[in-house]
Image: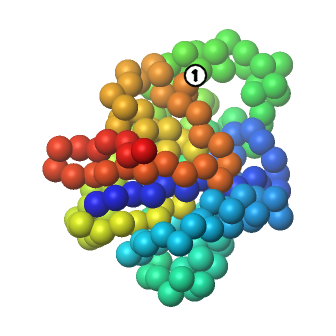
Amino acid sequence: MILHLLRHGETEQGGGLRGSLDDALTEAGWAQLRAAVQADEHWDALVSSPLQRCARFAEELAAARELPLHFEAGLQELHFGEWEGRSAAQLMETDADDLGRFWADPYAFTPPGGEPLLAFEARVLAAIQRLQTDYQGQQLLVVTHGGVMRLLLARARGLPREQLLQVSITHGQRVHLQVDALGMRELS
């Protein structure tokens, strides 16, 4: 299975830790996503996080390309608990030590009330396994979130867990992974 991962575009509420907040896309965010899929590519189906910053674009694209669309809750962003909606600058004013621990090793420190990274990882990998079972041998465009893409890229690149947050993913960015019985690897 080939996964063409696409991070959602810019959201109305701006930067910061959006997590499970259900923000809408800005006009610039819509433009980022439309530009990312202009090439005449072949996908067998579309899969999307159910959060509207992913789902609304996936619905538009599925209708335009006449492709089946599946919403996969397992591909939602990490839930940041009490940190949701706050920027790194805001957290530096109130929670600098904890933010530093999170950046140093997000597996070892969970934001207050947030989803532990091990649980997030298990949720995302279970979703990928379901997709691999349901769409074996197919090419999927997956509209998802930066955290999901960082996790999958870090695994495909064999990075240690402490380097997870060093993987950079911008709005509207695409990456390509091959998923098979041997695991996953990044495609150029």
Q: Tell me which residue sits at (44%, 82%) in the image.
A: 68
Nearer the observer, 78 or 139: 139
Compared across the picture, whether 170 is left or right of 157 comes to: right
Q: Is residue 68 above or below residue 109?
A: below
**Residue at the farthest left position:** 181
Q: What element carries label 1?
A: helix
Q: Quadrant of residue 119?
A: top left
Q: Tell me which residue sits at (21%, 52%) in the image.
A: 180
Q: Tell me which residue sits at (16%, 50%) in the image.
A: 181
Q: Can residue 67 be seen in this view?
A: yes
Q: Is residue 84 visible?
A: no
Q: Is residue 172 above or below residue 185?
A: below
| Mark 1 Cα-neighbour bin, 10 Å: few <14, some 14–19, many ≥20 | some
Indicate the position of residue 153 as horizontal and vertical percent values: 43, 38
Split into 4 quadrants, where in the image is the C terminus?
top left
Residue identifier under label 1? 102
Q: In this view, does 22 lie above or below 117?
A: below
**Residue at the farthest top position:** 97
Compared across the picture, whether 151 is left or right of 91 comes to: left
